[in-house]
Amino acid sequence: MVAEQGERGTETAIAFGLSGGALIRYDVTNGTLIRILLLVGCLWLAIRLWPVILVLAVALLIVGTLSPAVLWLENHRVKRALGIALVFAAVLLTLVLILTLTVPSVIGQAATLFEREPGLRAGLADRLARHHLSAAFADWLRNLKYSAHGYNLGATAFSYSLRLFEIAAYGMSAIFLALYMMIDRDRLRGGLFALVPRTRHIRLSRIMLNAETIVGAYIRGQLITCFLIGAFTYILLKACGIENAMALALFAAMADVLPYIGAILSVVPPVLAALGYSPATALVVLISMLCYEEFESRVLVPRIYGSSLRLPPSVVFFSLMAGGTLMGLLGALLALPAAATVMMLIEELRVDLPGEQGHPSDLLMMAEDSREEAEYARRSDGVPAEGAAAIAVEMASDRRTKDTP
């Protein structure tokens, strides 16, 4: 490869040598090289600041989740500062009550399960040994040994204490950042709108409102599905007379956050706990949990996420698979809001897809956009960025209200 500088210094010629002496020459402008270097620098900076980006993303999730409650209080003549304080206080009080009511019971039940684990494993192995097909698995279960590191809870807890402290610190940073963003909303929004040409303010305000709706719907969907499977598991185990139902139900609710693998993680512990009582009880728990998982995947998830995020079930399924493949657990968790945001941006930016034909309604929407932009230009003439942002958001909210059936 040979690089040559152009005569006027505005172009860089890059030549690639091929076999036989042939050369392929590419002329790249200096501006293009600068953009490439800036892109590489931004990628490097994003990798280095990945924890900070995650804190910002979590803060935006918190803002998008709590903003509708604050807006509802504002509409009922509660000052914004007081509304933010009330919402955060209510969330904090709810978390404290949940932790107070569940953590002691869960810790006690988890300790009981850990102490009973050898007996439960031996009983399960004895039942498996009665059948010829499962006898080999019974021998493996009896001879199962835990490593010293994995079995020593004290050493394991100590080794992970620093990591847990780091996660807690990032979580608190995200909460305080979200609180600051909600309190200083107008100034932050004005700064963002000052960076964007005024001809794009209406479209930017619609994107912000839709993104807030997507984030709120995603968090509410997660909370609903986790609560439902936790309640179902608790009621099922209590009805079957199985001890430690609270700990197992809480584990099932936490595991349900994980797409696909969460279904397995939420089913296996209750079934194993039921095996300590009788095979019939374990079979009832297994069938009941599988039926609920099928109901959740085919009815609840498409309805909750599909309607709230405006995603068809096929897109929900494909997004979860793609996100999990590309980024693992984090990608699977963020796949649904990311897919909904991409579809919303395509719609709001009027991106013409290759296989899509023009529709008469698109012309009407473009005409409505032009009318709104002209109206916004008239109303925001001479108004500072902060006030112009408020006008744009108000107009976008009015249009969304009008378009909502």
Image (tube, rainbow, N blue to C red):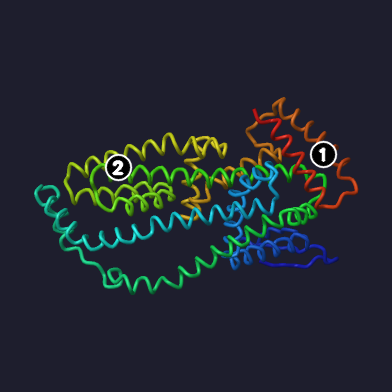
> Of circles 2 and 1, which is in front?
2
Q: Relative to the observer, which residue lies in front, 391 or 21?
A: 391
Q: Residues within 10 Å of mark 2 (few under 14, many from 20)?
A: some
Q: Which SS class for mark 1?
A: helix
* Relative vertical location of residue 268 with respect to residue 287 in this rendering, above or below: below
Nearer-N-terminus badge (2/1): 2
Q: Residue 146 is drawn in which quadrant?
A: bottom left
* Label disc, if present, on residue 373 of the rendered structure: 1
401 to 237, vertically: above or below:
above
Q: Which residue is mark 2?
A: 236
**In the rendering, which numbered label is found on residue 202?**
none
Q: Position of residue 257 (x, y in %)?
A: 44, 50
Quarter that holds the C terminus: top right
Q: Position of residue 41 (x, y in %)?
A: 67, 66
Split into 4 quadrants, where in the image is the N terminus? Answer: bottom right
**137 or 161, which is in the foreground?**
161
Q: Taking 96 as reference, is 51 left or right? A: right
From the viewer's side, name the closer residue of 334 and 252: 252
Q: Residue at x 23, y 46 (%)?
A: 241
What amino acid is at disc 1? Glu
**Residue type, mark 2 in image:** Leu
